[in-house]
Structure formats: structure tokens, C-alpha cells
Image (tube, helix red, strand yellow):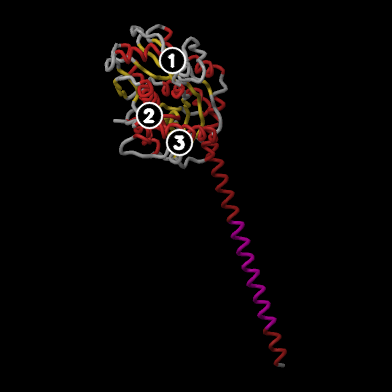
Amino acid sequence: MIRTSETGHQGEDHLGMEKTMITRRSLLSGTTAAGLSMSGIGFAQAQSQAQSYPDRPVKVILPYTAGSPNDMMARMIAPVLSSRLGQPAVIDNRPGGGTTIGLKAVMTAKPDGYTLLYTNTPTHVIAQLVARGFTYDPIKDFVPIVTVGSTTLVLVVPPTLPANSLQEFIAYAKANPGTLNFGYGQGTLPHLVGEAFKMATGTDIASIPYKGGAQAVTDMLGGRIQMILSAGATLLPLIREGKIKAIAVTSPARSSELPDVPTMIEGGLPALTTVTYYGFLGPAGMPADVVARLNSEVNESLKSAELRASMIKVGFEPTGGSPQDFAALIAAQLERWAPIVKSSGFQMD
């Protein structure tokens, strides 16, 4: 009887355990199902957000003055991009501080794809090396979206200056120390290359900083500046009209738009060879699907024959590519220019 009673209790215990296991399995099954359901909802929401982006205007911040090469190219692609996005791409110029004013505005913006940065690779990496009271990581604090185009710099002088080649200009500067002025947008690639030019040639040329390179061009036309390095986009019309004189380009080979102008390599200054890449970035933390959407639309925009022709006409080479391509360009520019900036004592006031 005792055995029978024990067996009965064991059976009841076993049955209870089975019930408990069934209950736990049911609970886990329900929890898993709920989790999968929530994942499905989250995925659906992400898809919905990607499909609805953008549902209002997208602000494109340019840390440069109106009329600069960056501004010119941004205003070329903005209308095409706007038509593809179905919302206006609004250009917002925020010059000053060697581009840091515009950079701060983007870094502190909500990373939702509605505030973008349009800049170029050398300046983006140079500014953080020399900015006073403001530091940032050109790679970690921003999300590369897409490269739009590239260009090189042109060294120009006034037509009244008695120098028609790079070597003649260097000789004239040495013969007239302290009488020439070099104008540039503060904290930009032309600023750095110009300082490197003076160091490499041993010339005494005064450095005159501006908020943007376009202001320096205006002062050259007014007779106050005798040396400028800038992208061909803003200089080509004036060169063709004979209002300024091109004596060298920084491209590895001669420019198709200026076939008669020698390269820095031909002039004996190969270290000054450089290419500038322009493109879109966003604040760190932007959703991957928004980055992908913007990248795709810019690449599609660059297929426009009209846009490509307009860019090439003023000295820009259409580029395009993936976010990873743009990130690699930024990293390469950082590796190249960081040691030069540090060794040259390059400063921003």
C-alpha cells in the first residue's frame, strides 16, 4: 500500500512537471512569437520611413561663401537632386572659421537626413588639424554619402604682372620681395597649397585671408591681390576673358579646359600636385537606409547628360560612387595632408 501510495505521488509529480514544462513552452512560444511580431513591426516601420523619406525640404549646408567652387557645384546638382527626391534641396551657406561654422551646424543637427554637409575632401580633413577651440574627427563625426565630382587648382596672376609662366612668376616674386599678395579662403586647400608654394620656392609673398576664395578673386580684379590658387570653376570664365592669367595647374596632367597651361610637375614643383573631391556627408548616426537613398539619387542625378556637360564646362569632373568610396578618399586625404599641415606650421587665425 505504501508502495502504491508512493507510486501514485510520483505519477502526480511527473504529471505536474509535464504541465509546468508545457506551460513554459507555451510562454516561450508566445514570447518568441511576440518578439518576431515586434521585429516585423520594426522592420515595417523602417521600410515605411525609408519609403517616406524625405517628406519635407532637405537642408544642404555649405561652409563656404556664395560663388565659391563648392557653392557652384552644389547649386548645379541641387535642382536635379530635388526633382528625384520630390522635395527641395535648399542650399544654406555658412562660411567662416575655416569651414568650422558650417561643420558645427551639421554635427549638432539631428541625424535624420534632413541636414547635410556639402564640402571637399582636403578642406574637410585640414580644418580639424588647425581649428582653434574646436575639434572633430573628419571620419567618425560624419557619415560619407557620395562623391559628386572632382577638380584641380589653377594658379592665376593679374594680366598686368610681367610673368607668363610659373618660373617667370617665381623669379619676379624673388626680385620683388614683400610686394605681392596671395589671397585665399581661410583654412582651405588653396590656403595650404599656397603656403607650401611659398616654402618650396623661397618667395616672400604676403598671405591675405578671406572668408571665401571668391572675395580674393574680386580683389585681384581690383588690383589688390597678385596670386590666387582656386578651382577652375570660378576662374575659367575670367581666364577666357583675359581678366586674369593662368600660369599653372595642380592636376597630374594638363587640363582639357586649359591645354596651354603647364602643370606644377612641368614647372618643377611636383609636390604641389593635388586633386579636390567634392561630395555630401551627414552627421554621425544617420540611418543606413537614408544614406543609401541619397547615394542612389545622387548617382542617378549624375547620369544626366545636361548636368555632366555643365560640370565639365566649368572644370568639374563628375564622379559618383559608393559611401565606402568617399570614405576611402577622405582617409587618403587625411593621411596625405596631416603630416604636411603639422610640419608646415599651417595656422588659421
Task: Name the element at disc 1.
Answer: strand
Say the numbered circle drawn on residue 177: none
Apparent side of residue 272 relative to residue 1 in the rendered image (left or right): left
- State the extent of the magenta-drawn residues as a range: 10-34
Q: Which comes sooner in the sequence, label 1 or label 2?
A: 2
Circle 1 residue: 248
Q: Quadrant of the N terminus?
A: bottom right
Q: Tell me which residue sits at (56%, 41%) in the image.
A: 47
Counting other residues with Cα less than 10 Å from the Cα at mark 1, is it few (<14), some (14-19), or many (20 or more)?
many
Indicate the amino acid at tag 2: Pro
Separation of residues labelled 1 and 3 (CA atoms): 34 Å
Q: Are marks 1 and 2 in contact (CB under 8 Å)?
A: no
Nearer the observer: mark 1 or 2; the answer is 1
Indicate the amino acid at tag 1: Ala
Q: Which comes sooner in the sequence, label 3 or label 2?
A: 2
Q: Residue furthest bottom?
A: 1
Q: Is residue 36 above or below residue 343?
A: below
Say the numbered circle drawn on residue 282: 3
Q: Where is residue 252? Give x, y as percent.
A: 51, 20
Q: Is residue 348 above or below residue 178?
A: below
**Between residues 236 and 72, which one lies in front from this camera angle?**
236
Q: Are marks 3 and 2 in contact (CB under 8 Å)?
A: no
**Between residues 14 and 280, which one lies in front from this camera angle?**
280
* Dominant secondary structure, magenta: helix
Q: Where is residue 212? Give x, y as percent.
A: 34, 23
Nearer the observer: mark 1 or 3; the answer is 1
Separation of residues labelled 1 and 2 (CA atoms): 27 Å
Q: Is residue 90 magenta?
A: no
Task: Name the element at disc 3.
Answer: strand
Circle 2 residue: 63
Q: Tell me which residue sits at (41%, 14%) in the image.
A: 235
Q: Are marks 1 and 3 in contact (CB under 8 Å)?
A: no
